Amino acid sequence: MALHWWQRAVFYQIYPRSFADSNGDGIGDLDGVTAHLDYLESLGIDAIWLNPINPSPLDDWGYDVSDYCGIHPDLGDLAAFDRLVADAHRRGIRVIVDLVPNHTSNQHPWFVESRASRSNPKRDWYIWVPGSPDRPPNNWQSTFSGSAWKYDPTTASWYLHMFLEQQPDLNYRNPRVVEAMHDVIRFWLERGADGFRIDVIAGLIKDAELRDNPARAVTDPDIPWHSKGTQDPLHSHDRPEVHDVIREFRRVSDSYEQRILVGETWPREHERLADFLRPDELQLAFNFRFLLARYDASRFRAAIEQTERSFGPGAWPTWTLSNHDFPRHISRYSRDGDGEARARVAAMMLFALRGTPFIYYGEEIGMRDAAIPADRKRDPVGRDGCRSPMQWTDAPNGGFSTSANTWLPCGDFKAVNVARQLNDPHSMLALYGRLIQLRKSTPALVEGSYRAFEGAPEDCLVFRRDTPQQHIVVALNFTAEPRAIAIPAGKILLSTLPDRSNVAKSSLMLEPNEGVIVMLDAKITG
Ligand code: NOJ
């Protein structure tokens, strides 16, 4: 089946400050990533996504860009980026970078100009409303906290910031802003980047009249972001016009070969995720309902089936368990159960679903959130725990850096590190390696159709992946008790438990928190 490279690929997300420090300053950098491409290649990674690498005052750790066409000096320079891309490409590994188009840093020269006077030529590059300091222009809430408006006495006006006040929102109703962002896209594609993960993609354009957002009428406990606020961001987020902006980004991206756009998509209603994946929009879109689901078969089933139902034949799913904004899934799953065993089941789900899997650095070794003492906190909204340094060995700082001071404290690298797991067939790393290899050597796991398996217990997630030649059942026991599942005869290709024998009897008995991938002897009819 003619799938695109990004449909077959396994992606690996790297938080560059925390992956590997090549120059001993306590901060990970691009040369550090290059130095570990061997590791990624042997794991079977096809593409990496780098969190922001641009110059930034780091109020939001790079999501506040002050120069879209440079590299933050902590991370290296453009030559280091070129080296990384060249070495990755030589190995057949693609590199996508983070594009942060919704807002800049307040130190970006565009904003410095824009705020200087009401008549500045860059004034309309941002969203300004003249007014008095006691009354913000409307009721919009920042994603982080409080009003999304900041009063600037220099020109007696308010500016919009949907995140920190140091992150003013750009005005995508101004064609010059759109053109400037197209130039940024071209800059990185010319340099060899294979595409972008696009930050806050659904929020790029705001209501032309800046109308108040309504209160949220219904909150759905299955949609985690509903609990975040009582406001429905009707006028500030996921406006219909945003799709025109995306189409233009895609047009620019498609003027280069084989490039992709991956959206950080928070649709207002989850059913609308598919809208971002229309043929002339994004290729991939993160699925946060899935990422944030509790360890519970019915939650995952609902997220997966909604995706399968609402995605048309052209839209391709993306699956992710962790990223740099939320506690790592192994830490979340450990709150009320055996996090390690659960993370193994979740990994099997990740690689066996129909769609493109993204791994967050360290999850392949079962890295947990690090404990961050109060005096070492760096992130204004408390996300440091999941951004701690990669744990390579049991040497000081887990082999991440030779510096006495790493930018964030390290987690428990004595217990969990790459070196220790490399030769341990029972390790999380070995399981990730096997799952990736199995996926690559089993067409049904990549190209096969997805279908729920009828008749399995509700608290297990059991599904089929079929091509005309291969018939697979993936059976995942999300409970802490054994579960029997009646499946046709077949052979177990892989279990999340290391010592299971490989023949499936007609009734498969799953151990607590066990997942298996079974190749059936014959097609299930019906
Ligand atoms: C989403 C990014 O993932 C997050 O880290 C950032 O704080 C916000 N967007 C604002 O850019």
Image (tube, rainbow, N blue to C red):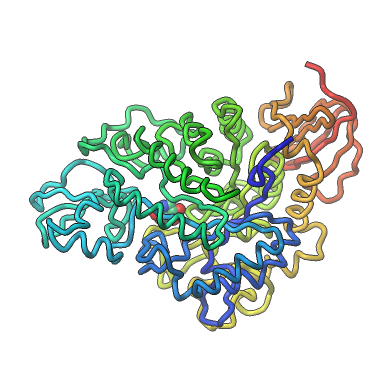
Near-viewer residue (228 or 210): 210
Residue that appears at 38% across and 53% down: 181
For the residue pair 497 and 193, the one nearer the viewer reads as 193
Task: Give the image quarter of residue 361.
Answer: bottom right
Q: Ligand 1, what quadrant?
A: bottom left
The residue at the point 60 percent across, 41 percent down is 295
The reply to whether residue 504 is in sight is: yes
Q: Position of residue 83 (x, y in %)?
A: 60, 71
Furthest residue toward front:
255
- Left-right relation of 103 to 484: left
Q: Which quadrant of the view contains residue 447?
A: top right
Q: Is residue 234 left or right of residue 431?
A: left
Q: Quadrant of the C terminus?
A: top right
How many numbered tags mark residues here? 0
Vertical order, 88 against 349 (above or below): below
Residue at the top extreme of this rendering: 526
**Above or below: residue 475 compared with residue 391:** above
- Identify the residue at horizontal 47%, vertical 43% (top origin): 251
Relative image position of residue 223 (x, y in whole percent): 46, 35
Would residue 412 be visible to someone looking at this image? no
- In the figure, is residue 307 to the left or right of 472? left
Is the residue 494 above or below the residue 196 in the image?
above
Q: Nearer the viewer, residue 142 or 98?
A: 98
- Residue 522 appears at what percent x and percent y? 88, 26
Q: Quadrant of the N terminus?
A: top right
Residue 199: where, in percent of width, then height? Answer: 43, 51
